Image (cartoon, rainbow, N blue to C red):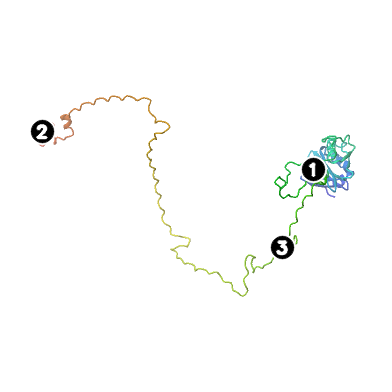
Amino acid sequence: MTTTGWLPAPTEELFGTEATAEESYDVLTVDVPPVSWITALETARDRLSCTYFDWLSAVDEPGTGFRVAAHVVALSPVRRLLVRTTVPHESAVLPSLVGVYAGAAWHERETHEMFGVRFEGHPGLDHLLLPETFEGHPLRKDFVLAARVAKAWPGAKEPGESEHGGARRRQMLPPGVPDPNEWGPLKGQLPPAPTRPARAAAGGRATGDRPVRRTRTASEGSASQPPATEGTPTEAPPTTPRRARSASQGSASQRPQTPPTPPTPPTEPVDAPKPPSAPDAPWPPARPAFEEPAEPSEPSAPTEPASDDATSEGRTPEDRTPEHRTPEDRTPENPAGGSQ
């Protein structure tokens, strides 16, 4: 015997010889028979330190029974344990866990109300969520959803069920919804739902039969290649002679390259003359509010005749006339200059 998960001892030693255990997603699940239900939960509380009671519920397994599960947790360190048992549909009875975990009282009332499992020893299995006059257990798989039969479900229209008529598809009923022609106020008044015709087999073959696949060898090639006729030699496609090139000519991929054309400078756009404003413009051209008076221009000063000195300026002593020469000027007759 080997231990499973974080159990300190083998499963058979802790929960009995008929118990099995497995661990998945950090949850250790132990399945026990109904007679060991209370003993298994006491072992989880006392020997495995699972002092925290989390929840209790059931699942309806058609053909098997109701699988009741209780989830308890050890807090230091945190370890989760799920104890399960299965009771038959005909006698869904289990002892109550209120004496082991007081928090199970609320969960057992809900499980009894939804599935019909009776917990012996419970202080009061009264209605918890449903009204007092409600009959049946709504979470059982055989519970009939009468509202789906008596009243159409909004949005449950099948293709072809609109007012314009047309072919109607076979109606798909969810679990718990019987055929309205077999149960409910319209029982026996509706025509039977049309059945979908069987699909004809292609080529007259039975369903599931496939044609034998042709096998080919490596020499025959694939199925897309046509087989060659025996005795007829296969002709190779004609090949063109390869052009020889010298080293100066280069390879076939090299082509003489033309010098790049220098880019033309962008031409500046010439401003087009503005068209004159249309006479029918919505607003007149802008004008000043008032015209400023023109300032009187100052009279120009009379031009004085140029003096002899101004006229003589810019002339060399040689260019001056004798009457304009001074004694200090140098002349061929007076090379030293000055007065003689």
Work out how far the residue at label 2 is from the one at label 3, CA to CA, in angstroms: 143 Å
Q: Answer with mark 1 or mark 2, whichever residue precedes in sequence.
A: 1
Q: Nearer the viewer, mark 1 or mark 3?
A: 1
Badge number at residue 203: 3
Question: Which is more toward the observer, 187 or 246?
Answer: 187
Q: Answer with mark 1 or mark 3, whichever residue precedes in sequence.
A: 1
Does 94 sit left or right of 167 as displayed?
right
Q: Answer with mark 2 or mark 3, whichever residue precedes in sequence.
A: 3
- Element marked by disc 2: helix
Amino acid carrying label 3: it is: Gly
Work out how far the residue at label 1 is from the one at label 2, CA to CA, in angstroms: 147 Å
Q: Specify the quadrant that holds the C terminus.
A: top left
Does 330 sit left or right of 238 as displayed?
left
Work out how far the residue at label 1 is from the one at label 3, CA to CA, in angstroms: 43 Å
Does 162 sit left or right of 1 as displayed?
left
Amino acid carrying label 2: it is: Pro
Q: Is disc 1 in contact with disc 2, using a CB cutoff of under 8 Å? A: no
